[in-house]
Image (tube, grey):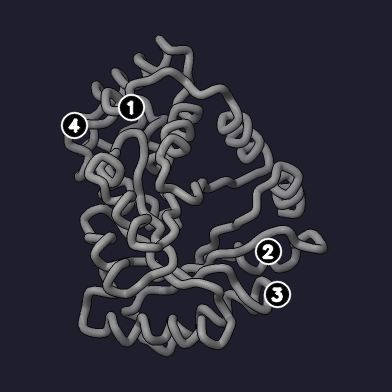
Amino acid sequence: MRFLLQTGSDAGVKMIATKPGGDGERLLGQAWPFPSPFRVTVQTVALSEGLDRVEARARRSLERMGLPRGEALLVNNAADLAGAEGRALWDRLQALKTRGLFRSIGFCATVEDGPALLARRLEADVVQISCNLLDQRAAAEGVLDEIKAGGAEVHLASVFAGGLLFAVGDELPPHLATYAQALSRTRRRLAERRCDPMQAALAYAFSLKAVDRVVASVASAAELRAILAAAHAPGPDLSWPELALEAPAAFTADARARISSAA
């Protein structure tokens, strides 16, 4: 973890996004360089665990990382804010912000959550939304621009489509086998342009003017170096709409479910 953080620091990475599951927060707390150049975003546990638990776990996240405050606290599922306890949940986040524990608050969302309207209603500071080369709906339908116009920062997640952008036909689960041909066609188009999928995915993300931050998961310093190299490669000459799936909703919903299970 220290090597990973040092690699990120040397490359100019300024923000780290965390989740409450697993041991990542504790390991980060043990490995920060000093002085730390990083700002940290924290996600809540599910509202089904109760409001008190949501608040306590957010505080605990900072304690585990040894931080007096975090950059942003994000509700991990926008649907929690649409339910009966949604306002009470948001009030808890507002209180933590008022006390200075987090500089900003927001939520994680997909296109189906109606994030632009929700962000305006709540006056959210940050929206972390899924959008990628295969599922471009948030950009094509103007959702990213609406969120940005409403005053919230846009953090782009799932930029690699949960790893499915790199999967070949025999690696896809059976119910996604129908996408094998479309994925093969996308990879072929990229190869013709001498562009690998990681480079294309990041170039697409960086092409979206409404986006403030791009969130990418890494498991090692080597992975981070590969992502940084792809991010700094010359921008490919590609037609982004030609690379999107025609009907990505089920595909990306499955990717989100598998990512949540893995986490």
Q: Amino acid at mark 1?
A: Trp
Residue 238, position as x, y percentages in the image: 38, 20
**Residue sitting at 36 percent across and 31 percent down?**
171
Where residue 88 is drawn, which disc sits there? none
Q: Position of residue 108 (x, y in %)?
A: 37, 62
Decide: marks 2, 1 in contact (CB < 8 A)?
no
Q: Nearer the viewer, mark 4 or mark 2?
A: 4
Using the image, determine if residue 185 lies above or below residue 157.
Answer: above
Which residue position is annotated with label 3? 66
Residue nearer the viewer, 200 or 261: 200
Tag 3 secondary structure: loop
Residue 34: in sight, yes or no? yes
User: Which residue was labeled with disc 2?
Assistant: 27
| Badge 2 element | helix
Q: Are marks 4 and 2 in contact (CB under 8 Å)?
A: no
Label 1 neighbourhood size at 10 Å, few (<14), some (14-19), many (20+)?
some
Q: Is residue 134 left or right of residue 112?
A: right
Residue ID for mark 4 = 246
Quarter of the picture holding the C terminus: bottom left
Location of residue 71 with respect to 205 vertically, above or below: below
Task: Find the distance from the CA under tag 1 to the CA under tag 4.
Answer: 12 Å
Q: Residue furthest top?
A: 192
Mark 1 or mark 3, whichever is nearer to me: 1
Q: Amino acid at mark 4?
A: Glu
Q: Which residue is mark 1?
A: 240
Of the 4 image quadrants, the one containing the N terminus is bottom right
Q: Secondary structure at mark 1?
A: helix
Which of label 1 and label 4 is nearer to you? 1
Q: Position of residue 113 (x, y in %)?
A: 23, 61
Asked if labels 2 and 3 touch by Cβ distance under 8 angstroms, the answer is: no
Tell me the kind of residue under disc 3: Gly
